[in-house]
Image (spheres, grey):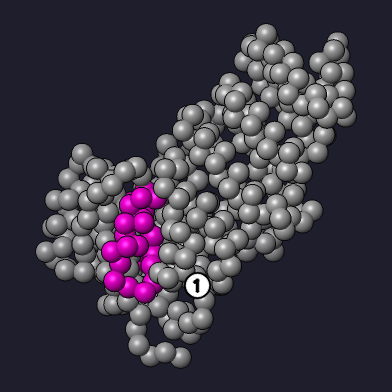
Amino acid sequence: MNSEKPLISIIIPSFNRADLLGETLEALLHQDYSEWEAIVVDDGSKERNEEITSEYSRKDERIRFIKRDKKPGGAPVCRNIGIQNAKGAYLIFLDSDDLLLPFTLSQRAGIIMKEPGLDYWVFPMLTFRNTPEDAGFLWNIENGEPDLKRFLRLDAPWQTSGPVWRKEAAARIGGFTEGLACWQDVDFHLKALTGGLKGNKYYSLRPDVLYRQHDTQSISQTEISSPEKLRSRQRIFFTHANSLIPVMTPGTKSDLQILGGNIAIGAAKTLNSGICFSVIRFGMKNGIFNPGNVITLTVIASLYLLRLNRISLSGRYIDRMTRTFRQDNNIGKHLYLKSTEK
């Protein structure tokens, strides 16, 4: 066991929510472990984020403030700036409204010293809404399924603040993908799982982070998605499918079918036929979607349009899909029959 205590850099992207940022920084001051630094990277806030961080910096010089100095904006860019400026060999990516418990860093440092040969170590968390006292939902539960499968099916086995990362390993996989409007953590964790990083999970330990849930987060689970989010999901699907296709197993193929299907149907729900068709075409071209998948997705997309009373557009969906895939006689035949059923 290495007796030297590791320096852990806590990287906190910040955009407004100044009052909650203060709570996050206050929790750091109560850690029972001393070898840490915190880097608050501001994403162009209009609130008092710099002022609040400066107040805490005066209390504890281990807390630093950095303004994002490049484009695009967003948490991925801020986290990458944090990686570049981190002095520690180990990283925690903490959201600006979440809370570390007093024993978080000592618990995590102890595991790092016991198992120093890993690239990341994952720890359990609790979720809460208003106050830490109402925390109750445990995030990071093992269910026997591989982590890659769970992330592809959007059943994330851990959240951004759950792991500690070796700085060198986070840099090796390119850090966070900049420009994504959603699913940034899913993308980063998929890069780790497909990029050869070695990790372990310690779900039997005490939960050591409190993850704050906001009512607005439920929006991402509804049928409403902005074009930017749809494009980000499409980009993530293409990127990780391309990395997995050369080594695709039947199980991975099934998982990619579910991920791509969710994205295609999500695009159809918001009348974004371009993304819907491009995802289905990509899946078909690369052997992810079979004829049955294509037919099913086309019918589901059309049914959503009918539910929205977009009858003529529903017909055009089926017609366009039939023409798009006419080079495949099997798919074209079945789509034609579906479009002429009474």
Spot the residue most to the front.
327
Q: Which residue is mark 1?
A: 119
Residue 35, quarter of the rendered image: bottom left
- Residue 105, percent from left and from top: 36, 73
For the residue pair 70 and 334, the one nearer the viewer reads as: 70
Q: Please tell me whether residue 211 is drawn above or below residue 8 in the rendered image.
A: above
Q: The C terminus is located in which quarter?
A: top right
* In-image side of 99 versus 219 (left or right): left
Residue at image position (36%, 56%) is: 80
- Residue 245, percent from left and from top: 70, 52
The stretch drawn in magenta includes residue 76: yes
For the residue pair 285 and 299, the one nearer the viewer reads as: 285
The type of residue carrying mark 1 is Asp
The stretch drawn in magenta includes residue 33: no
For the residue pair 146 and 250, the one nearer the viewer reads as: 250
- Residue 313, percent from left and from top: 65, 12
Magenta stretch? 75-101
Residue at image position (81%, 27%) is: 327
Label 1 SS:
loop
- Residue 170, percent from left and from top: 45, 64
Spot the residue most to the top.
312
* In-image side of 316 versus 80 (left or right): right
Residue at image position (55%, 69%) is: 197
